[in-house]
Image (cartoon, rainbow, N blue to C red):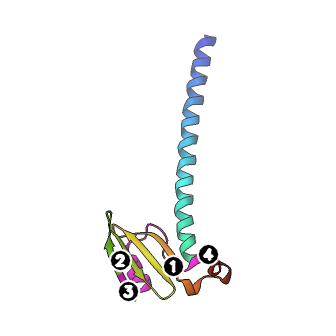
Amino acid sequence: MLCEKSKLLGGLIAILSLTLSLCVTSINADSSNESFADQESIRGFPARGVSQSTVLEKYGEPEKRNGPVGDPAIVVWKYPQFSVYFERKLVITSVAAEDQLPQKLKNIQ
């Protein structure tokens, strides 16, 4: 009888552990999505994962489009204050234009 109770308790602990680990994974995924949105609002240019159509809606037509180049194809859209790099129509990164960088970063060579 004691053996059955310990097996039951062990099973419950295993289920609770699995449930807790799934909850933590879900929270981490939500946090990373929020951080991309936060980055966009803080930096003022598109965050990773944003679609080309969303970039066009929010920032308008770029001054210049370069690419596609390479495999997978990379496309670059140049705006006055930043450039946006796309792969498969999704932002992979955005970088500030050189004249928008702080002086400390401009002097690094």
Earlier sequence position, callout 4 versus callout 3: 3
Per the image, the residue denoted by label 4 is 109
**Cα–Cα span, label 1 and label 2:** 14 Å
The image shows residue 53 at horizontal and vertical percentages of: 35, 77
Residue 4 occupies which quadrant of the picture?
Answer: top right
Circles 2 and 3 in contact, beta carbons < 8 Å: no
Q: Which residue is drawn at 60% across and 82% down?
A: 101
- Image location (x, y in percent) of residue 90: 38, 69
Q: In this view, does 108 lie to the left or right of 78?
A: right
Q: In the picture, which quadrant includes the C terminus?
A: bottom right
Nearest to viewer (mark 1 / mark 4): 4
In the rendered structure, which disc, 3 or 1, sits on the residue that comes first in sequence? 1
Residue name at image x 44 percent, y 76 percent: 84
Q: Residue 45 carries which label?
A: 1
Q: Kindly report the distance in space between the C-alpha atoms of the residues bearing marks 3 and 1.
A: 16 Å
Q: Which of marks 1 and 2 is nearer the N terminus?
A: 1
Residue 8 is left or right of residue 72, and the answer is: right
Query: What is the x, y in percent for residue 61?
Result: 37, 87
Part of the protein shown in magenta: 42-65
Task: Report the Cα–Cα distance between label 4 and label 2.
Answer: 35 Å
**Residue underneath mark 2:** 53
Q: Quadrant of residue 42?
A: bottom right
Q: Which residue is drawn at 56% across and 53% down?
A: 28
99 to the left or right of 93: right
Residue 76 in magenta stretch: no
Q: How far apart are marks 1 and 4 (CA)?
A: 25 Å
Quadrant assignment for the N terminus = top right
Q: Mark 3 points at which residue?
A: 64
